[in-house]
């Protein structure tokens, strides 16, 4: 028998939201919390270490934030990202070769501040949303998409990159020993 405390594995809707929306946003927030745990104790030189094939941790953190804003403003809010938000993203997402632009020289704290600021914008955008609007398809040129699906996609997107962050961290720490 174990003396470990009993875990409560359940989803509690974020307060101030329609319950279904609050549950989806809780999941999004939980993914971000786990991403933060993945980076605890990381040394600054690991953030910019570039693997032979793939992206640095800094590049991935920048990518996670800008993609979240792209989906929020273009799909959910059905408009263009305001210049005030673009100002937090001095580099385009991808280079001419289609690969993620390499983002270096930014501290983990600065990456966290950007991620926190973008998440705050997303949470505020969903706060007044009704369940009907959460489920209402937005019609874009290439597809129809609901805000519910956007949240699902952002959860999946960050979780996939979180695995990549862990792999890059392990490779970097081994290479920099």
Image (spheres, rainbow, N blue to C red):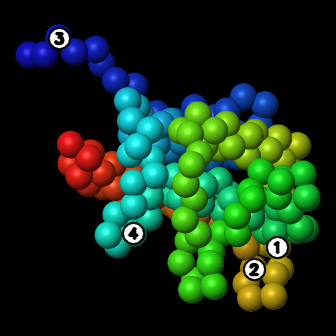
- Of 149 and 162, nearer the camera is 162
Residue 77 x %, y %: 86, 61
Q: Residue at x 22, y 15 (%)?
A: 4
Looking at the rendered image, the quarter that the N terminus falls into is top left
Question: How many angstroms separate mark 4 from mark 2 (CA)?
Answer: 31 Å
Residue where numbered disc 1 is placed: 138
Question: How many angstroms separate mark 2 from mark 3 (CA)?
Answer: 50 Å
- Of 147 and 98, nearer the camera is 98
Image: 141 above or below 42: below
| N-term mark: 4 or 3 | 3
Q: Is residue 73 visible?
A: yes
Question: How many angstroms separate mark 2 from mark 1 (CA)?
Answer: 5 Å
Position of 55 with respect to 129 (left or right) is: left
| Local secondary structure at mark 2 | strand
Position of 175 with respect to 137 (left or right) is: left
The answer to whether mark 2 and mark 1 are in CB contact below 8 A is yes
Q: Residue at x 13, y 16 (%)?
A: 2
| N-term mark: 4 or 2 | 4
| Local secondary structure at mark 4 | loop
Residue where numbered disc 4 is placed: 54
Q: Residue at x 57, y 59 (%)?
A: 103
Residue 171 x %, y %: 26, 54
- Of 76 and 65, nearer the camera is 65
The mark found on residue 144 in the picture is 2
Residue 96 x %, y %: 63, 85
């Amino acid at each position: 028998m174990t003396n470990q405390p009993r875990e409560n594995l359940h989803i509690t809707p974020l307060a101030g939201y329609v319950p279904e929306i609050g549950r989806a946003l809780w999941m999004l927030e939980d993914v971000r919390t786990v991403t933060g745990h993945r980076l605890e104790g990381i040394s600054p030189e690991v953030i910019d270490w570039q693997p032979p094939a793939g992206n640095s941790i800094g590049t991935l953190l920048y990518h996670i934030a800008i993609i979240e804003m792209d989906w929020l403003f273009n799909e959910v809010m059905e408009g263009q990202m305001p210049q005030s938000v673009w100002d937090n993203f001095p580099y385009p997402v991808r280079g001419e070769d289609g690969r993620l632009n390499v983002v270096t020289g930014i501290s983990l704290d600065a990456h966290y501040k950007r991620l926190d600021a973008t998440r705050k914008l997303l949470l505020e955008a969903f706060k007044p949303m009704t369940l009907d609007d959460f489920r209402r398809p937005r019609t874009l040129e290439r597809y129809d998409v609901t805000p519910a699906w956007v949240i699902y996609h952002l959860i999946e997107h960050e979780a996939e990159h979180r695995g990549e962050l862990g792999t890059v961290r392990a490779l970097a720490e081994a290479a920099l020993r």
